[in-house]
Amino acid sequence: MNRTVLLIPALCGKLNDATITSALNQAHHNDLKTWEQENIPYTVRKKRQEFLANNEIQKAGNS
């Protein structure tokens, strides 16, 4: 499971322009980011990216 779980409501029911506009106005990026961090576990890909990013920082610090 990843952030695509947030797309599920868009696939359910009938949506009109007003509903979509309202949803976009109420969904702030920081709120979505916080929700994702609290509810969606790290995937292997995310763990790998974090490890490699930290490893690159360490290499740069040793130069």
Image: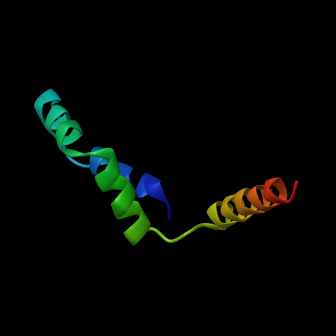
Location of residue 59 with respect to 27 vertically, above or below: below
Q: Quadrant of residue 5?
A: bottom left
Residue 2 in percent (x, y) is at: 49, 60
The residue at 35%/61% (across/down) is 34
> Does 36 sit left or right of 42 as displayed?
left
Location of residue 28 with respect to 31 vertically, above or below: above
Name the residue nearer the viewer: 21 or 52.
52
The residue at 24%/46% (across/down) is 27
In this orientation, does residue 42 appear?
A: yes
In this orientation, does residue 8 appear?
A: no
Q: Quadrant of residue 53?
A: bottom right
> Does 49 sit left or right of 9 as displayed?
right
The residue at 34%/62% (across/down) is 35
Name the residue nearer the viewer: 60 or 35.
60
Outermost residue on the right side: it is 63
Label count reads: 0
Residue 39 in percent (x, y) is at: 39, 70
Name the residue nearer the viewer: 18 or 46.
46
Q: Quadrant of residue 47?
A: bottom right
Residue 10 in percent (x, y) is at: 29, 45
> Does 52 sit left or right of 32 as displayed?
right
Residue 30 in percent (x, y) is at: 33, 51
Outermost residue on the left side: it is 18
Location of residue 42 with respect to 26 vertically, above or below: below
Outermost residue on the top side: it is 17
Name the residue nearer the viewer: 36 or 5.
36
Look at the image and name its color scheme: rainbow
